[in-house]
Image: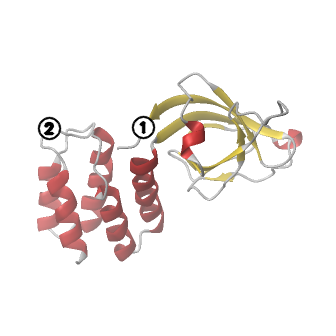
Amino acid sequence: MDVVEILEAAALLVPENVATGNDLTASDVWDHLVHDEWEVALDLLQELGDGWTAPTGFWERLGRSAQMLGFERSREWCWWRDAETRQGVIRADLVLRPAGQTFRRTPVPGAGVLRPMWDIGNRRHDGEPELDIARVWVEFAPGLPPGGRAPVRLLPLDPGRWGRLVPGDRITLYECAEAGGTATILETRPPV
């Protein structure tokens, strides 16, 4: 399949009543495809993907088209969203400790590269915290500097261990023995 065929197949999956904040719909995707505006069509499909629960394969298709077009961050975002359809969505408000209070001196990379440990309330047999691993995607920014605050998406290594979290729960990020930040759960959704 070429890029156009992949984008056309993805556009066919979007329900007619789904629109972006600017009232753009799947019919607008078709207009961009007719004019060979593939990047715009891809961006619009990604934005439309936020307005409904996309089936398995939708985000994988968009990721393939982004890869074929050479858009690395867009590809990673689509693959991230594809993983969320299979594992569920966990969004949180993350606040990092300032640079002088933790070992981190550089921003947390925003595109799901960092895989820190988290205290989400699970305990070992002796009562001590049992840390769990989840990748971090910083929403709307390329990174999060020390002392910064941003909404993030978490993709756990073992999603089943995170299933009891609900909005309002507080969890703690660890990259070393000291806490590096805290996050408040904003949203959880089960897999598609």
Camera-side residue of 145 and 92:
92
Q: Quadrant of the N terminus?
A: bottom left
Q: Is residue 126 above or below residue 116?
A: above
Helix, strand, or loop for circle 1?
loop
> Residue at left 30%, top 59%?
57
* Residue furthest front as drawn: 125
Name the one closer to the observer, 78 or 74: 78
Q: Which residue is mark 2?
A: 17
Residue 142 percent across, percent down from the top left: 57, 53
Q: Is residue 40 above or below residue 135?
A: below
Question: Mark 1 = which residue?
Answer: 190
Which residue lies at the image location 35% right of the left edge and 74% below the top edge?
A: 69
Q: Amino acid at mark 1?
A: Pro
Q: Earlier in the sequence, mark 1 or mark 2?
A: 2
- Residue 113: x %, y % from top left: 62, 59
Labels 1 and 2 touching (C-beta < 8 A): no
Q: How many numbered marks does the figure carry?
A: 2
